[in-house]
Every structure is written in structure tokens, then in C-alpha cells.
């Protein structure tokens, strides 16, 4: 179950799970190299080594996109550059120029990258082939864009995708659910849990947070009546 998701509408591609599997195989994930800061690609959704890149479950297609990054603390880079600058000043009697400083920063970063620990995250992609839905368990547009960019590269001509547009915004729909004292507005199979952020309007909106707290109460309904809406998670 996705805690957060972005939903897109697919065009005519892919025609089958086998076609999607073949396309994703063009960009398999590989770990970052010693001096590489970022690596992306497709991995088996079940986590099995050399497993299928697309799983079919009850007619639905599941894939997984991996993102690995290596970050070097800025302080470490600055110390390395300062050491190099001091050496140049001591041995040549001059201060490095702007271009040379940029080169020194690049050299420092490359020299420190092999010591950096990689961090990996994954994005699960669910495709409903009948309705042409593509759903990703992300709330950040940047990660979603990376997945879409990879799909564009591997699909070739004929790939089309667009964000699913709804008649009612998610915030307005959730506000209606919370404002309904009887609970009749809540769709079947949905539950109201115990955490929420309500955000007001204006340039400096007030934010009210509820944690481990019942939400079907008069206080929440009053905030909704005054114009607050559930905050969209990013």
C-alpha cells in the first residue's frame, strides 16, 4: 500500500508486460563507481538477483527504479581545498585564481568520493494496463521526473504520459471527509487515521498538526470550516 503516490495516465505504450521488461532491460541499475556521485536504473521488484524487472500480479505490472547517491560533506571538501591553496601559496608565492579554485574543488571532490558511503532509495512503479494508469510511490516531483525520463529513453517513439487530472483536488476531498461528522462522505475501503496537518490560507498560513490523535472531532471540523485544508505531503 502506497503512503504517498503520483498518478499518471499512459499513452499506448507499453503493449505488454514483456515489452516493458525488454525496454527496462536497456537501463539496468549499477552501483555508483568509485568517483561517481549518482547512479539510477531498474531493479527486480522482488529484490531477487537477476530476477525479472517486471512482475505481473493479477493483471497488474510492477517495476522498481533505484536511485543511488554518494555525498561528500562540504566541510571536508573545503578543508581539502584550503590545504591545496596553502600548498600553492607556499610553493609558488601566488594565490589561485577563480578557475583554478574551481578545478581544486573538483579534484577534492573526486579524491574524497571513494570514501563516501552510498545511499540508495527505490521507487515502486505500478501500471494498470487496462485503464492505462502509471502510479509511483513518491511525493517528490524530482524523483518522479527521473523515472519518467528513464521511461522516455527506453520507450523510444510513441511514449506518452501525463499527470492524471481529477475533478476535485486531493486536499478538497480529504477536507470534505474530515468535515463530515457522520462519516458518509468517506469512500468505501478508506479509513481516517490519527495523523494530519491542516494548513490555512494566506502568505503565512497557520499550520495545525495532529499526531496520534482522533481526527473525527469538532476541533478538526472547526479548522476545516475556517478554511484550513489537509496539507499535501512532499
Image: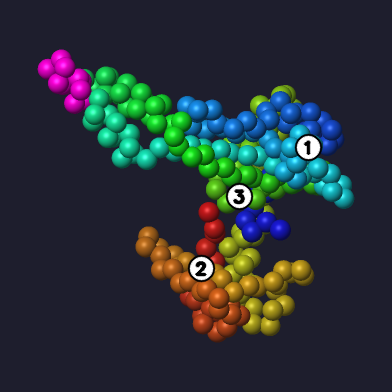
Colour approach in the figure:
rainbow
- Residue span colored magenta: 85-96
The reply to whether callout 3 and callout 2 are in contact (CB within 8 Å) is: no
Q: Which label is found at residue 51?
A: 1
Residue 26 on image: x %, y %: 71, 25
Residue 149 painted magenta: no
Image point (74%, 37%), residue name? 49
Residue 50 on image: x %, y %: 76, 34
Q: Is residue 225 visible?
A: no
Residue 185 on image: x %, y %: 70, 74
Secondary element at tag 3: loop
Q: Is residue 31 above or below residue 102?
A: below
Of 11 and 34, nearer the camera is 34
- The residue tagged 3 is 138
Mark positioned earlier in the residue sequence (1 or 2): 1
Q: How far apart are marks 3 and 2 (CA)?
A: 18 Å
Q: Which label is found at residue 197?
A: 2
The reply to whether callout 1 and callout 2 are in contact (CB within 8 Å) is: no
Mark positioned earlier in the residue sequence (3 or 2): 3
Query: As drawn, which residue projects farthest toward the top?
Result: 92
Amino acid at each position: 500500500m502506497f503512503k504517498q503516490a503520483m498518478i499518471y495516465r499512459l499513452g499506448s505504450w507499453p503493449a505488454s508486460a514483456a515489452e516493458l521488461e525488454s525496454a527496462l532491460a536497456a537501463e539496468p541499475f549499477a552501483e555508483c563507481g568509485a568517483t561517481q556521485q549518482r547512479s539510477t536504473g531498474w531493479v527486480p521488484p522482488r529484490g531477487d538477483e537477476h530476477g525479472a524487472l517486471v512482475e505481473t500480479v493479477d493483471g497488474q505490472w510492477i517495476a522498481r527504479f533505484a536511485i543511488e547517491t554518494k555525498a561528500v560533506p562540504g566541510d571536508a571538501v573545503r578543508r581539502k581545498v584550503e590545504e591545496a591553496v596553502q600548498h600553492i601559496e607556499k610553493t609558488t608565492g601566488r594565490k589561485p585564481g577563480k578557475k583554478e579554485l574551481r578545478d581544486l574543488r573538483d579534484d577534492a571532490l573526486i579524491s574524497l568520493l571513494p570514501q563516501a558511503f552510498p545511499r540508495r532509495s527505490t521507487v515502486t512503479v505500478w501500471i494498470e494496463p487496462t485503464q492505462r494508469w502509471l502510479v509511483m510511490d513518491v511525493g517528490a516531483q524530482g524523483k518522479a521526473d527521473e523515472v519518467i525520463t528513464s521511461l522516455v529513453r527506453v520507450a523510444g517513439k510513441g511514449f506518452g504520459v501525463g499527470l492524471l487530472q481529477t475533478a476535485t483536488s486531493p486536499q478538497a476531498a480529504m477536507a470534505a471527509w474530515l468535515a463530515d461528522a457522520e462519516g458518509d462522505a468517506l469512500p468505501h475501503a478508506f479509513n481516517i487515521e490519527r495523523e494530519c496537518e491542516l494548513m490555512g490560507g494566506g502568505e503565512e498560513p497557520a499550520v495545525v498538526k495532529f499526531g496520534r490523535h482522533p481526527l473525527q472531532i469538532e476541533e478538526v471540523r472547526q479548522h476545516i470550516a475556517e478554511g484550513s485544508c489537509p496539507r499535501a505531503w512532499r
